[in-house]
Image: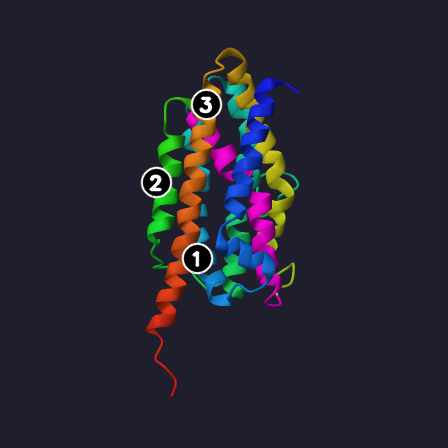
Amino acid sequence: MDKYLMRLESAKAQLIEQIRSHSLLARCRAGNVTLDELKILLVQQGLYSAHFTRYLCAMMANLPSNNEVLELAENLFEELGLAPDSPQPHHLIYREMLDHYALTLDDAQPLSGTQRLIESMYQHCRDPNPASGLGALCLGAEALVPSIYSDIICGFESHGASQHDIAFFHIHVACDDGHAETIRDIMLDIASTAPEQIDVMIRAGTELVEARLAFFSAIEAAHQERQRAQPAIA
């Protein structure tokens, strides 16, 4: 295996292990996460994901050539529902999931962890050095999605959710490995001529994972605050 690929795959495995160690995801896997926490997650994830095409476009603007832009355009087309096998925009699929749980993003405010995650992703994707945005989107997002969303699916299933109810998560478990590989291949091309950029990529992914951990912690804190605010029943 190529030495640069080995470094990226090793970093990916470590970051997946780190993110899955968070108590929220652990409780999803165990089936004892509350539905209220999952609903908070849906809204906060929706606020973060609403920017996804803009993260991607910001990063694409810094790629070294049109070849890389075209490679990533496939990811963008899927998000927008323009790919032949993805006829519905992903944001509409997400909205249907929100509707099922009687939730909306209208007037929703990001928690501190959500705002940090959004700002961190924008910071890296807007960096003129494309290694930063690539590392953030790959190691800090797309490469993590199948593992994170699989855990979240377990949480929803513990509350009786069907595959249709949470179709957005199932779709992304299936497709985001391919998205991550597309970005990873561009990262390897850059590393082949500028090996020092591997460190930039891994550092960006690590910073996004730290922001994602804060995102999950903020959801738990918001749930706990709601519980404290509920009047005691005599």
Of the pair 127 and 2, the residue shown nearer to us = 2
**Does residue 29 appear anywhere in the picture?**
yes
Q: Position of residue 154 (x, y in %)?
A: 61, 58
Disc 2 marks which amino acid? Glu
Residue at 37% from the left image edge and 36% from the top image edge: 122
**Mark 3 against mark 2, which lies toward the viewer?**
3
Q: Quadrant of residue 157?
A: bottom right
Please give the residue where the numbered disc 3 appears in the rendered image.
Answer: 199
Q: Which mark is residue 43?
A: 1
In the foreground, 186 or 17: 17
Q: Which residues are magenta?
A: 131-160
Q: Say whether disc 3 or disc 1 marks the residue closer to the N-terminus.
A: 1
Label 3, residues with CA under 10 Å away: few <14, some 14-19, many ≥20: some
Task: Report the residue that reaches farthest toward the top.
Answer: 193
Q: Residue furthest bottom?
A: 234
Identify the secondary structure beneath mark 1: helix
Res. 119 mark: 2
Quadrant including the N terminus? top right
| Residue 52 rendering spot, x and y as whole percentages | 45, 41
The kind of residue on which mark 3 rests is: Asp
CA–CA distance in space, label 3 to label 1: 33 Å
What amino acid type is highlighted by mark number 1? Val
Locate the C terminus and report the quarter of the image it occupies.
bottom left
Q: Are marks 1 and 2 in contact (CB under 8 Å)?
A: no
